[in-house]
Image (cartoon, rainbow, N blue to C red):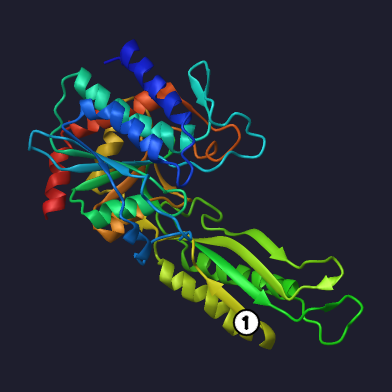
Amino acid sequence: MAVTVALRNEAQQFLMDLIRIPSTRGHEGPASRYVYSKIHSLVDECELVPIDDSIIQDPDYAFPLPGFTYQDTPNVECVIKGSGEGPTIVFNAHLDVVPPSEGQEDAFFPRDENGVIFGRGASDDKGQVTTMYALALLLRERGIRPKGDLIFHFVIEEENGGNGTLAMIRRGVKADAAIVLESSNMAVIPAVRGAVWFELKVFGRAAHSGNAQGRISALDKAFEAIQIWRGYHDRLLAESHHLPLFDKYADPMPLTIGQCQAGTWPSSVPSLAVLKGLIGFLPNKNRHEVQAGLRQALLDEGDEWLREHFELSFPMLNNDGNSLPVDHPLVTGLVKSVQAMGLPGEIHAMTAACDAWLYNNQVGIPTVVFGPGSILHAHSKEEQISIDDILKAAEILADYVQGDTQMELLKKSQS
């Protein structure tokens, strides 16, 4: 059944209005209220969910900022009641975006080029937010009552570690399955890489460039630390070979040093060097093991000075990976709905981190990632998504929530 012109126009307007809201961290409130205002009449229940500042004390909280408050940045939760015959499914998409990229002019002024929408957040993740909105529109327009309840979570702060989703699961959520919407090119993703972000401070002994005695460059020692960690990464990768879906990638979990700061003067030996970056890891390891491994590598392989003169912390994003067997009914059922739309129904792994692990690992809800758009466009100055892909994804989800595979999923969750 073709999507009507009216629904297409409504979805496109929703996306473009949402892109116009610069919902970087701490500024998501207007986006939350906009989504609430547009979707509350399409669902059975809808609520702006405040986040208590006590979430900052949660051991899984990411990126604490001094003086930060959640007074004006709520999540949104909606419920579409089902007929009672099927499983409860929670859908998740995030409202926050990263700041504009270098060279990305007018990032928050969307443009339409023959049905392709450009702007910050188009493919990460406001196109996916729009998919959930279009799903609600489709169900209402076609008079479809899903077999089970559908819970929509529109969350803040995914980009800096998942604090919005963390707040939702700490509030309590019960479901038989979760679908986290991210750019997947319509592939179903049951396996997601984890990530640990780190900050390493290396201390040296400052000196004049003409003094060759007693000088210890913190920057030189930081470079030594990088080489030690490259070896740790290679060992970690070797231990992770043969995990389903990840082996097609040469390195699905790279080590990245994103920032390096050292010194105050070109001819002075620096006494402090600070490295910030991340290391990915696959679901056979957890974040605590990787954090400990990074520290132990420096203690085991660093020279006498380095071993005793570093501080390693993990104050930023620390996500575990997650995985489901490819024959899980959530995976096979969603693949069937993708194929019903004439698409291949590919099953891939995700080599970036997202909020899926919070549902899958923390509260035991089987979770996959799925959505329109390409991760190649995310965070880029040419960020974009096709409105046709958004609507196709919504149709896939509409087919899935009323399909005959729901009973298999329900039986699996009850076993």
Among the 4 quarters of the image, the one containing residue 68? bottom left
Q: Is residue 8 above or below residue 91?
A: above
Among the 4 quarters of the image, the one containing residue 330? top left
Q: Is residue 20 above or below residue 328?
A: above
Q: Is residue 140 left or right of residue 317?
A: left
Name the residue: 52% across, 71% down. Answer: 313
Query: In the current view of this chain or complex, which residue is farthest to the right?
Result: 210
Name the residue: 73% across, 71% down. Answer: 219
Query: In the current view of this chain or complex, which residue is farthest to the left?
Result: 84
Query: Given the image, on which type of amino acid does mark 1 rest?
Result: Glu
Name the residue: 8% across, 37% down. Answer: 85
Residue indicated by mark 1: 301
Residue 371 appears in the figure: no
Q: Is residue 107 above or below residue 5?
A: below
Name the residue: 83% across, 72% down. Answer: 268
In depth, the one of 167 and 349 nearer the eye is: 167
Among the 4 quarters of the image, the one containing residue 347? top left
Q: Position of residue 345 (x, y in %)?
A: 36, 35
Q: Position of residue 388 (x, y in %)?
A: 41, 21
Query: In the current view of this chain or complex, which residue is farthest to the top?
Result: 5
Picture quarter with the C terminus: bottom left
